[in-house]
Amino acid sequence: MIQNLEDMIRRFCAYGLEFKDSDGFTHDWCTIIPALELAYKTSVHSSTGKTPAMLEKGCNPRLPEDTRRKDLIEIHPTASSFNLMLDKVKNHAKQSKNEAFDYAKQKWDKIHKVPDIKVGDLVLVSTVDFNNIKGPRKLKDSYGGPFVIVALHETNAVQVELSGELEKKHSNFAVSLIKPYQPADKELFPLRNPTTLTVPPVEQNEDKKIKKGGLGVKIRDNILSDIEIQYMKMNGWQNQKYLTQINS
């Protein structure tokens, strides 16, 4: 976003617009740069579907031309010249903004591709953010796995079924931190054992995570409300005899 703003300002200033009004005053980029800020704040963002002004203030700014009367016959020459300058500056600001955003989109689309992955695929997970793995840090593997993808979060992140040393790690990863697993070639590596990994059912995974992170954590923290106890009893939690002892 910062690079987009920099590119937008450079385009607006480098290929700037100079306007000379009827009074002989020349308006350069120093005096008309607020129009660029207005054009950016009133542009609809592709991700949020809202303008920055709407997200920040709750409303879009109103301009004098929005309340201008259209039934006026005579307009003062100074006001007419100022209105003409505003229209040209606004169009130039919108053009600079659109060109900067289109250029950034072209660069992004050129180096980024939508990953071709689906549930059940084997992937390797980057260990760049794992600082508590056993062994020397400089000998740590760059990637761990392979692990099975159990859920997709649109095209930006995936959920994998971690096991072994990484079992207690967070199971959601961005697509930039994973890469497809390629099995070893038997002709080149005949002594390497093939990887055998079964895909666990999603229902068992969710039940396992609920039991592991629900009852155990709440018992240790001694925080159980009446609604939580009722929910646990309805879903057949084990060790229900300890629930009354915890809250007593």
Image: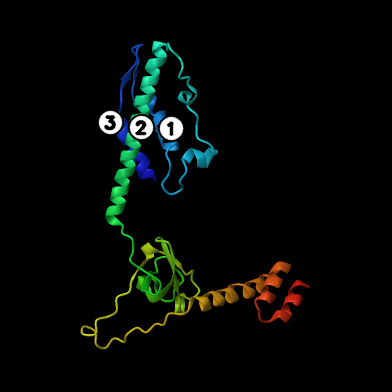
Left or right of 111: which side holds 205?
right
Q: Amino acid at mark 2?
A: Ala
Q: Which SS class for mark 1?
A: helix
Q: Based on the displayed image, in which of its 4 quarters is residue 157 positioned?
A: bottom left
**Residue at the outermost bottom position:** 191
Q: Based on the displayed image, in which of its 4 quarters is residue 224 positioned?
A: bottom right
**Residue at the outermost right position:** 248
Q: Which residue is mark 1?
A: 38
Picture residue at 54% right of the left edge, 74% below the top: 206
| Image depth: mark 3 or mark 1 in front | 1
Residue 43 position in % (x across, y down) = 42, 38
Residue 30 appears anywhere in the view: no
Residue 4 position in % (x across, y down) = 35, 43
Question: Colour mode?
Answer: rainbow
Q: Which residue is mark 2?
A: 93
Alpha carbon distance from label 1 to label 2: 9 Å
Query: Taking 65 as reference, is 145 above or below it?
Result: below
Mark 3 surroundings: few (<14), some (14-19) or many (≥20) residues within 10 A: few
Q: Amino acid at mark 1?
A: Leu
Q: Amino acid at mark 3?
A: Tyr
Picture residue at 29% right of the left edge, 44% below the top: 103
**First-in-chain label (3 vs 1):** 3
| Image depth: mark 2 or mark 3 in front | 2
Q: Name the disc covering residue 15, or none.
A: 3
Mark 1 surroundings: few (<14), some (14-19) or many (≥20) residues within 10 A: some
Question: Depth check: 94 or 36 in front?
Answer: 94
